[in-house]
Image: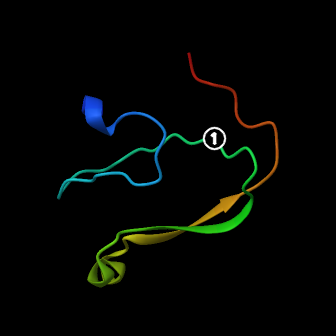
Amino acid sequence: MPPSPNERGNKDVVRVPPGFVTKINAIFRTLYGQLRLHCHILEHEDYDMMRPLKVVHGKGLPRKK
């Protein structure tokens, strides 16, 4: 299911309804290193809603057609 019109565009916060799996496409032009994806509800850290993300400098992967 695509995001609603008010959820589209460049942002650093994504709404994730309960029970959904969310895919995020991102391009990091100047930010590299170890980052964290996380839920803004502290208790959710216990339910794997805080994940490491490693951003490396490179040409990226080719897009699927």
Q: Dividing the image into 4 quarters, which one contains the C terminus?
A: top right
**Which residue in the protein does label 1 denote?**
27
- The residue depicted at 35 percent of the width and 69 percent of the height is 39
**55 in relation to 27, above or below:** below
Secondary structure beneath label 1: loop
The residue closer to the viewer here, 1 or 12, is 12
Q: Dividing the image into 4 quarters, which one contains the N terminus?
A: top left
Q: Quadrant of residue 26?
A: top right
- The residue depicted at 75 percent of the width and 58 percent of the height is 32
Left or right: residue 11 versus residue 57 is left
Q: Quadrant of residue 49?
A: bottom left
**48 in relation to 24, above or below:** below
The residue closer to the viewer here, 62 or 41, is 41
Left or right: residue 61 versus residue 16 is right
> Given the current orientation, which residue lies at the most extreme right position?
58
Q: Residues within 10 Å of mark 1 (few under 14, many from 20)?
A: few
- The residue depicted at 20 percent of the width and 53 percent of the height is 17
**52 in relation to 58, above or below:** below
Left or right: residue 14 versus residue 65 is left
Tell me where residue 52 appears, x and y as whole percent: 56, 69
